[in-house]
């Protein structure tokens, strides 16, 4: 109790993370309402700025107004700042400011930082955060420099701004672009579908941003000595490789057959990479087959890896579920991988996340389908894109009403902050029971 007799409210790390993201989103939405942010010079309606700010902070890329043609350079800069904050995480950005100013980081703050970047332990978290910030700066700068010759050749001095914008957007897996023109809005980077430099650089930025900061550290510390990597890093790298190569082969064999071979190869690989969870596209997604779009939905729900700039239920979640299924088929008691036994808690968490994402995606799509009168398949694609924080679209998002936009806003927020984080934030306390209820078996399957 304090001297005034009032009990001090202490927020959990999950509550701090959730409130932090929400505060940045609302601040960004209010700034984007300023007349200086839009090229028309008018105040943009709050529902549109809220959608845009949520999409930026949650590094999704779904938009209701074309970024290039609607927003001024000021508005685009605000969106880019929101993307950077959302990509690294609000807590990481706040911690970086504290470290730069020389303030001491308390144990409680270190615990919040640990949850923010999904670090395994609190120890060394400040050093890890410095590593993340330094690595981000170097990678985003390298990506911008690599794309500058192409963009400066095509757009003159504005190409410098475009290089930095798309480098940060790609690394943060945001999918925002400023390629749109009055006669060709929402174009993404389709104009560069055959350009090897833009394709390769953006794909590398997406992959590096999406594999997670813990995996970065293993790669930097151990180079090519894979046996020294943590189990998480091994699972992340193997699963990511499978989820890129497999769908790319499917897209190449089943879609885009009318394209020249070079553009078809780049297009197939790029669409496979961008689905988890970048949101750029170099080809018309609406022309893809039903099978191709179904694969897209699955990949968007999986997303990137823990502690990365990407969203989704994460590659490790899928890997744990598959490994558990394999162990069940082999009648083994515990799932195993790379000579290690998986933690039972990871299996429970993976199952919960899978059920949560599938439920959110399905019921949200059903709601939008009923509200808008659109085909269920189109709605399912958009909701998977939102909850996976991807940003790929079949073109219906700008046409949706306010109610449907709110549904997508909620999905983007849950997808970036994390469904379990929201649940843990809402259920802030739990009493640990020393006793257990009697166990009784049930038949499953």
Image: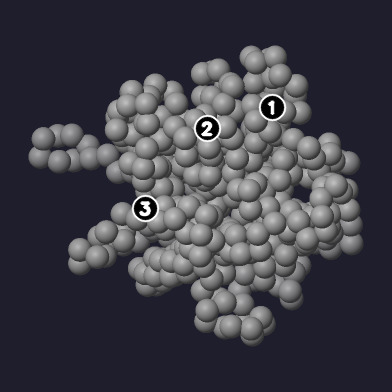
Mark 3 or mark 1, whichever is nearer to me: 1
**361 left or right of 78 in image:** right
Q: How many marks?
A: 3
Q: Residues within 10 Å of mark 1 (few under 14, many from 20)?
A: many
Q: Quadrant of residue 244?
A: bottom right
Q: Is residue 439 visible?
A: no
Q: Quadrant of residue 324?
A: bottom right
Above/below status of 342 relative to 13: below
Which secondary structure lies at badge 2? Answer: loop
**In 3D space, how far apart are the residues under numbered discs 3 and 1 (Cα atoms)?**
33 Å
Which residue has dot 1 on it?
379
Which residue has dot 2 on it?
182
Which secondary structure lies at badge 3? Answer: helix
Which secondary structure lies at badge 1? Answer: helix
Give whichever of 98, 156 is nearer the camera: 156
Of callouts 2 and 3, which one flags the residue occurring earlier in the amino acid sequence?
Answer: 3
Label 2 with label 3: CB-CB less than 8 Å: no
Q: Is residue 162 visible?
A: yes
Which residue ends up furthest to the left in the rendered image? 3
Which residue has dot 3 on it?
91
């Amino acid at each position: 109790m304090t001297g005034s007799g009032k009990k001090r409210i202490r927020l959990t790390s999950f509550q701090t993370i959730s409130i932090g993201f929400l505060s940045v989103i609302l601040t960004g939405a209010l700034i984007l309402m300023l007349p200086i942010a839009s090229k028309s010079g008018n105040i943009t309606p709050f529902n549109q700025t809220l959608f845009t700010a949520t999409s930026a902070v949650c590094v999704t890329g779904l938009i209701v107004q074309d970024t290039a043609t609607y927003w001024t350079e000021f508005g685009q800069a605000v969106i880019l700042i929101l993307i950077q904050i959302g990509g690294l995480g609000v807590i990481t950005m706040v911690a970086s400011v504290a470290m730069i100013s020389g303030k001491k980081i308390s144990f409680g703050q270190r615990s919040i930082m640990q949850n923010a970047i999904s670090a395994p332990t609190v120890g060394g978290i400040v050093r890890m955060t410095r590593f993340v910030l330094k690595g981000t700066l170097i990678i985003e700068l390298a990506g911008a420099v690599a794309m500058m010759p192409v963009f400066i050749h095509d757009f003159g001095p504005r190409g410098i701004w475009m290089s930095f914008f798309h480098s940060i957007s790609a690394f943060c897996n945001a999918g925002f672009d400023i390629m749109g023109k009055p006669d060709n809005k929402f174009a993404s980077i389709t104009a560069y579908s055959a350009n090897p430099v833009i394709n390769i650089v953006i794909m590398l930025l997406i992959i590096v941003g999406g594999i997670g900061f813990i995996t970065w550290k293993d790669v930097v510390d151990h180079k090519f000595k894979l046996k020294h990597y943590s189990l998480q890093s091994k699972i992340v790298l193997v699963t990511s490789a499978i989820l890129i190569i497999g769908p790319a082969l499917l897209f190449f064999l089943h879609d885009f057959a009318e394209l020249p071979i070079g553009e078809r190869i780049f297009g197939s690989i790029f669409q496979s990479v961008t689905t988890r969870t970048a949101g750029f596209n170099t080809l018309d997604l609406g022309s893809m087959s039903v099978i191709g779009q179904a694969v897209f939905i699955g990949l968007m729900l999986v997303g990137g890896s823990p502690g990365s700039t990407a969203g989704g239920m994460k590659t490790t979640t899928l890997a744990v579920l598959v490994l558990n299924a394999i162990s069940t088929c082999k009648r083994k008691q515990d799932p195993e991988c790379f000579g290690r036994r998986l933690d039972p808690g990871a299996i429970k968490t993976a199952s919960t996340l899978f059920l949560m994402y599938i439920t959110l995606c399905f019921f949200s799509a059903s709601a939008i389908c009923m509200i808008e009168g659109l085909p269920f398949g189109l709605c399912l694609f958009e909701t998977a894109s939102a909850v996976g924080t991807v940003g790929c679209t079949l073109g219906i998002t700008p046409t949706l009403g306010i109610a449907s936009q709110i549904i997508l806003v909620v999905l983007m927020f849950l997808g970036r902050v994390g469904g379990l984080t929201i649940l843990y934030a809402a259920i802030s306390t739990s009493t640990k029971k020393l006793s257990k209820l009697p166990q009784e078996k049930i038949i499953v399957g």
